[in-house]
Image: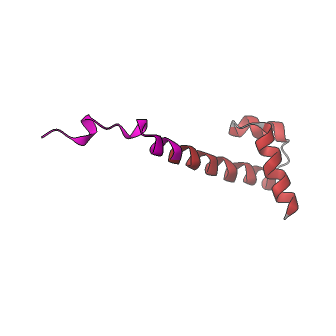
Amino acid sequence: MQSVSTFFKEEEDFLYQRGEKKAKEKMSHAFVKSLILESDLSDDQIGRIVKVEVDFVKERRAELNNK
């Protein structure tokens, strides 16, 4: 009997990919938030460190300022 993994590659499954993308976004969100709160780095610097768009960093900073 052959293994299911012979026919099905979870890395190619769209639900797996979507979950992986959400997990990466969640981790990026937390990392950006920490850098904003714990450092004096600019949005550009944080974007380069975390490898996200500067607009993403600006949105997180705006969310934190509204709290």
Classify residue 14 as left or right of residue 22. left
State which quadrant residue 21 falls in: top right
Most extreme residue toward the front is 14
Classify residue 49 as left or right of residue 37. left
Residue at image point 52% right, 44% down: 18
Q: Is residue 32 above or below residue 12?
A: below
Most extreme residue toward the left is 1
Q: Residue 37: x, y in percent?
A: 80, 56
Residue range in magenta is 1-18
Q: Which one is nearer the viewer's eye here, 18 or 41?
A: 18
Classify residue 47 as left or right of residue 17. right
Q: Is residue 29 magenta?
A: no
Residue at image point 76% right, 38% down: 47
Q: Quadrant of the N terminus?
A: top left
Most extreme residue toward the bottom is 67
Q: Is residue 3 above or below residue 30?
A: above
Q: How many marks?
A: 0
Q: Which one is nearer the viewer's eye here, 11 or 34?
A: 11
Q: Is residue 14 magenta?
A: yes
- Main SS of the magenta segment? helix
Residue at image point 78% right, 44% down: 57
Residue at image point 74% right, 34% down: 48
Q: Residue 9: x, y in percent?
A: 35, 37
Classify residue 28 as left or right of residue 19. right
Q: Residue 56: x, y in percent?
A: 76, 43
Q: Is residue 28 above or below residue 63?
A: above
Q: Is residue 38 above or below residue 41?
A: below
Judging from the image, the colouring scheme is: secondary structure
